[in-house]
Amino acid sequence: MSETEPQIEARRSADLRLALHLFRKNPLVLVGLVLSVGSIVLALLSPFLVNSTSWQITHPLLKNCWNNPLFGWGNSNIAHDCSSSYVLGTDSYGRNLLTMIVLAIPVDLQIALEVVLSAVAIGIVFGATASYAGGIVDEVILRVTDIFLAVPGILLAIVFMVVFGRTLTVLTGAVLLIWWPTYVRLVRSQVLSEKERPYVESLRSIGAGRFRILFRHIVPNSIYPLLVQATLDIGSVILTVSALTFIGLSPSPLLPELGNLASLGSQYFFTAPWLIIFPGLTILLISLGFNLLGDGLRDILDPRLRR
Amino acid sequence: MSGVQSSELLRMEDVFTWFPIKGGILGRTQAYVKAVDGVTLSVRRGETLGIVGESGCGKTTLARTVVRLAEPIKGRLLFDGTDILKLKGGRLKPFRRKMQMVFQDPYASLDPRQNVRSALTEPMHIHGIVSGKNEADKRAAELIRIVGLNPDHLSRFPHEFSGGQRQRIAVARALAVNPEFLVLDEPTSSLDVSVQAQILNLLRDLQKELGLTYLFISHNLAVVRQMCSRTGVMYLGRVVEIGPTESLFERPRHPYTEALLSSVPLPDPTKRRLLAPLEGDVPSPITIPSGCRFRTRCGYATDKCAEVFPPATEVAPDQFAECLYDIDFAKKTKRELPVSSVQ
Amino acid sequence: MDGSTQDILTVKKLQVNFHTFAGQVKALDGVDLSVKRGEVLGLVGESGSGKSVTALSIEGLLPQNAEVVGGQIILNGKDLLTEKQGEIRTARLREMAMVFQDPLTYLNPVLTVGSQILEILETDRRVFTPVVVAARLEDLNKAAREGTLTEKETREKASLEALLAEQTLGRREFKRLAKAYAVAILGRVRLPEPERMFKMYPFELSGGMRQRTMIAMALVRRPALLIADEITTALDVTVQAQILKLLRELKDQIDASILLITHDLAVVAEICDRVAVMYAGNIVEVAEVGELFKNPLHPYTQGLLAAIPRPDAVRGELTSIKGSVPNLIYPPSGCRFHPRCPSAFEKCPLSKPPLVEARAGHYVECFLYGG
């Protein structure tokens, strides 16, 4: 009457094997995984690795200190007390650059996560509402996202920060302003296509209400593309945040934030190049990591590749 | 249609389900797809009423209209004497519980991320027929056994099952809320022949045990013949002939029924026929021919067929056909029906 | 089942595996099949029986992850698995044509029906030159016999006869003849107003008309073997009857064998001469159609015939075959049907039964009948 047990087991292990296969076929996912998970672990451990208030303490005498023979840049320091214990040298405030980077990673990641998670939440609420209500509600929500998408994102964020002041919260809000419309549209199109699947009709015939169908069935079934987009966007959000602080919209010049650190270093590009290179490299690696991971997730989760 | 009103569980009266076609910049309605175009029929308690027809004849829309998935533009839909078209929301809910639907494609009609247990218990919670999780789980285990599966299967997901097993799960879910009436929309058309028989037998046994009433939609005349006590034949949105299955198959009165029946290949090489009595294709349900809608393909059509709308006439006991003529298909002769026999 | 010369197609011990992530699917497990000249052979089986894989192997359309492990496919004397690629291509092109279940997938939506037919002819002008010339000559000869030949046509006839010997034809001349030939074929598949059909796009046609178009496209090549893969499955009964009627007419007109692949035994009963029943990658039974329906030998065939509901009689309980089609990654040992078979005995799981001739012309792969 029914399928034999080994057959059902076979179907299960086939899914697993396929996922593993896709993983192996695309070794860059592994690189992405190492980089992104590595950065998250580093961020979580940073309070234990370095003194989390050390960014507020400046050492004018240790300005732009570098004594690292490995890279061969000369010691451009005017002061005396330079030693190679500053592996990446010191910045223009005399702070240990490595410590600053370790402190900056959680700041950037936190902003990125806040932005992406809020965008996903806004996307689910408004996107699902728009697609399920349809008609005038859909039209209004769509046109509002149109307006936001029509204005260049960075410009929008700059204006927002100029108006509301330069704090971390405003910075997060400014970047969220750029990202939320994409998610509304993504969720809306996902729900629209999911809504047409026969199981939705069968749920309606059972007597399931709109909200139950929407939030218990349709949204969970459209979560994969959302997950992929969110992962990809963590990298992009970090880039944008860094860009904003780099051009001078940092809440404080001392703030350990990767864009801000690079911005500080940019003034000494010729005399102390490490000051811009290492924060820049960190930005690159983290956003690359999340991008590769997102790409890999898309390959693994995409049902079109499954059969 | 017959005099025995009390035995009717469901009655459709002049039901029209039209879908607007919007077009132009203003999105005005330009025409209608007349999927169900004036259907009157009744389903009697405990019987299986079959609806057959070709694709596009409106049989699936009819099914969707009955379970209120498609909104008719006019007509009455009486379930146990109550016009459920007038009900909404909370007042409709008890009726939704009493009639459930099984869909054609068992691969698509189950939520892929929901395991079997959750799929079976969800309708129970929606309709509040169980008092707690334990009772629901117990009932789910009982249901899965009724449809011939194993309680071990409850924690599995739809993709781990074969087509026949998924259709069993779909049946179990429809039964979860103790319905009286099941609408079966092509329940076996995506299954293999050997499995089809398993599902048909299961449906028959369940009907006997639980006293269910079925509305059985199918394009497969052979399956309808085996399953149904009465059969209606749909063409372009109307039931052109309806009657007891035996007499309808043995002595069809409407020329479309006759053509349909003689088009079905028989699994018997000694009875080869294939006269292919019908030329051409079904006309569009947007522009339905005047008078009798079948006249454009009918071999017996006259000028009168274009002018007069044929009423349903009782051509044999309990058998009604929408045709102006009484046709002898063997001799290819016809005789005009007296108007007095009109229902 | 010897590969005698009266067979247009012989498949011997064909084994095909599919490589998937879940493991190797042993889709075909030594398929033996032969299509005689001029016959209609029905190949029936449920989903997963391997009937489509058999067709794809013959057509050379197996997907990338398939591997032919062993066996032979001999089309008109040429082994399609060992000959050179070019040879195989010409052999397929000249000898065989296919019609599929879903015409819309195979018709180009942006080209007219006519230009798609002309394209077939023009891509192999050398092959089709004698075909189109012969078709025109046939018309002219017919006119000559009836005495309605004009002077211009007499001249045309003479020049065409000369051309037929040389086998060369100018591009424009070829196109003119090809068009006339294509229109004639469209008429032959009973499409109304073939000249108008020639200029229509696939989306303007109904399902039945599209399937007729596909059949026309297959027939332009004058194949010796026509493979029809589930061609009526997507059609309504009344349209299916039209297409089957057409096939039956064509069978007498064209000089071709037809390999009809279907899951529907009723369709087989209506138009086939012989039937081969497939189950889980094996041919389990082959017989004349009358013999098979009257006297099915294999337990699977018996079960299948008993499971079909009939429109002309009511049965009580429908018989069904227990269980479902096995997963061919882990096929059952010995006879692949034994776990579902009501008459299985000790020998069945041990080795694969051979195909034996149980009665004259009636072959069965089952230990109940020896082997």
Image (cartoon, coloured by chain):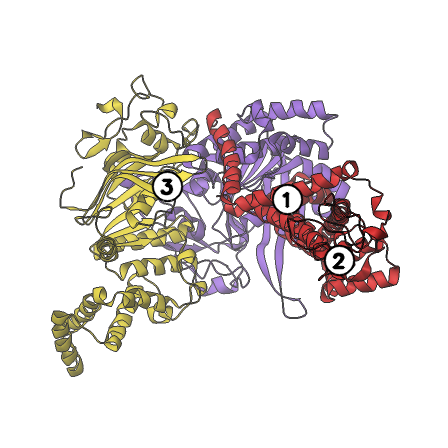
Chain colours: A red, B purple, C yellow
Above or below for A209 versus A177:
above
In this figure, which residue is indicated by the disc labeled 1?
A: A35
Label 1 Cα crowd, 10 Å radius (few <14 / some 14-19 / many 20+): many
Residue at label 2?
A265
The spot of residue C144 in percent (x, y) is 13, 74
Left-right relation of A300 to C130: right
Q: Is residue C233 left or right of residue A286?
A: left
Q: Secondary structure at mark 1?
A: helix
Circles 1, 3 touching at the beta carbon (< 8 Å): no
Residue under the image location 21 percent in, 66 percent down: C126
Choose mark 2 or mark 3, whichever is in front.
2
Choose mark 2 or mark 1, whichever is in front: 2
Q: CA distance from mark 2 to mark 3?
A: 74 Å
Q: Is residue C242 above or below residue C71?
A: below
Q: CA distance from mark 2 to mark 1?
A: 24 Å
Residue under pointer 3: C263
- Chain of the residue on which disc 2 is drawn: A
Q: Residue at x 30, y 50 (%)?
A: C59
Residue B41 at least partly seen: no
Determine the CA span between mark 1 and mark 3: 53 Å
Residue type at the position of mark 1: Leu
Q: Could you tell me residue B131's position as x and y percent? A: 75, 25
- Mark 3, other Cα within 10 Å: few <14 / some 14–19 / many ≥20: many
- Categorize mark 2 by other alpha carbons within 10 Å: few (<14), some (14-19), many (20+): many
Q: Chain of mark 1?
A: A
Q: Quadrant of residue C1?
A: top left
Q: Earlier in the sequence, mark 2 or mark 1?
A: 1
Q: Is disc 1 in the same subunit as disc 3? A: no
Q: The residue tagged with tag 3: helix, strand or loop? A: loop
